[in-house]
Amino acid sequence: MLAPKAQPNTRFDHLLIAEMVTRGSRVLDVGCGDGSLLQLLADTKDVDGRGIEVARERVNACVARGLSVIQGDADRDLADYPDDAFDFAILSLTIQATRQPKAVLEQLLRIGRSAIVSFPNFGHWQVRTRLLLTGRMPVTENLPDAWHESPNAHLCTIKDFGDLCRLVNARVERAVAFNIWGQRLGTWIPLTVHNLLGEKAVFMLTRSWPH
Amino acid sequence: MADAQDFQASTDARVLEATTPSSDTFDVGADRPLRLDCDKILSPYRIAYKTYGQLNADKSNAILVAHALTMDQYVASHHPVTGKPGWWEIMVGPGKPIDTDRFFVICPNVLGGCMGSTGPASINPHTAKPWGLDFPVITIGDMVDAQVPLIDHLGIDELFCVIGGSMGGMQVLEWTARHGDRVFAAVPIATAAWHSSQNIAFHEVGRQAVMADPNWAQGRYLELGSEPRNGLAVARMAAHITYLSEEALQQKFGRSLQDLAAKSFSFNADFQVESYLRHQGSTFVDRFDANSYLYITRAIDYFDLAAEHGDVLANAFKGTRTRFCVVSFTSDWLYPTRESREIVHALNAVAANVSFVEIESDKGHDAFLLDEPELFATVRGFLNAAAGKRGLRPAAGSR
């Protein structure tokens, strides 16, 4: 039998996360949406995956397709899990929509041996030029909603997120930024340029303190 | 007169079912006495049950359906007293979410029930009279413990799944807490880990209505040939309101009058909702035993899974390997979503494998028995995924 493969339309940030996750590990996907990342990880990495999703209809669709997902939210429901409950705690394009990103990140580092966080980079040149030229909150492909309809409460840049990692004493194991074509920016490129050209970023973190 | 005869016929049929049920039965002999939570011993006792589908060769495809307060073993077949279809035929049957082409379904009548399992309406072997109030007060945990010998008798080491709504969900939770190593997957629906003060209050109203009926005769009505019909009907009417929602009642009945052009200025059932409730009450007493109602409501009142585990609900599930799917309904005010969420939090605290779905419905608590496509999709999806993990083959001819 052929091993199940990622579909051709799989999101590039999901493919990177799938690269970072070790085979057969225990994974929590916080803000798992329609469950496509969990499904990808189950199919390609044989993980024991769980999800949390705030939108009821998405949760129901996930469970109906056989994924272990609960209705809940990152701000409220991470506190229940014991330390090191998962090998990887993933927050995929969700941290900007949480009420308390710092507290959520700390919980993520507590319940996962590794945390993987991806987010839209508010420092991207398109965002900067929109704001500069129009004087209005930028609406881009990556940030499609008007400010008053957006679920995003705490947008940040790659540099900002790096600062938050230092603030919570997280160790950055890996950081990758993608340009608008979904290409990974080379690690040799300086951070300032990442912050300008990266549309999305994925960070893999571990905690630098013992439990 | 015709009414009186009908009443006699249904009562006879019901009393007969309590003592000689038309379903399968398993008699648990003196070799397996049941130590109840009240510390009394029950022995011997009988569990009446129905099964559907075929047990596979390695006995790994069994699903136990745990029934709610006033249900019974006739989950997917006609009721012997009322002649009505099974109470969950929408969920259980060939090609249904609980697919009897694939799974072997067991539905036992609970201990304390009145459809053939040992309860206050069955004959006390020590006195040769109906148990009545001599029957010991039982708990949800006792109901579950009483089902274990049946599972042994059927040769099943591990149930593929235990599923149930309302009090059935409480049994699901007790199955996982007391016999978790024998439960691969669990689906507690529209339930809670403890019965709230408001819910105990409603039960008490029902019990007082039964006991205030002179025909109850201190619980000895079966011996005396009487029946606390009025009391039990009122109990059912009050309880039935809690199974619906304000929205559902308003939508279904509003302030409409029943076969009347104008108010009658009397205490007849002018309003459709009154007529509906009276009908619910009178049909219920045809098929249910008043003492069973007392005992089973009491068992639910006593249910508090956290209290059984040092006041920490998570302790009930420590080390569990069971896969859970918890389901609640938005308009259920008897077991509201927050109580399901408590179960989910406790399961998360032990890093259990848990799914949790809240289904939008205006049908109230009863939604779990009704046509709720999201419930069916959830149960089907969860069972399919769990069956895959358990290595069960899909039903022949299914997708």
Image (spheres, helix red, strand yellow):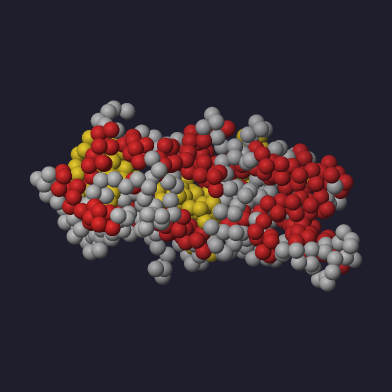
**Which x, y percent locates residue A69?**
41, 51
Q: Going by the image, does B198 lie left or right of B160? A: right
| Residue located 60% across and 52% down the image | B332
Q: On the rendered image, what quadrant is the C terminus of chain A found in?
A: top left
Q: How many numbered marks have been drawn onto this rendered protein structure?
A: 0
Eyeballing the image, is A171 above or below A176? above
| Residue located 71% across and 51% down the image | B239
Residue A25 shows in the view:
no
Eyeballing the image, is A61 above or below B292? below
Task: Name the residue nearer the viewer: B146 or B98.
Answer: B98
**Which x, y percent locates residue B141?**
59, 39
Residue A148 shows in the view:
yes
Q: Going by the image, does B284 lie left or right of B54? A: right
| Residue located 63% across and 35% down the image | B36
Q: On the rendered image, what quadrant is the N terminus of chain A found in?
A: bottom left
Q: Quadrant of residue A8?
A: bottom left
User: In the orientation shown, which residue stands out farthest toward the left?
Assistant: A188
Q: Going by the image, does B4 lie left or right of B295? A: right
**Which x, y percent locates residue A169?**
26, 31
| Residue located 62% across and 39% down the image | B303
Task: Name the residue nearer the viewer: B69 or B5.
Answer: B69
**Which x, y percent locates residue B100?**
50, 62
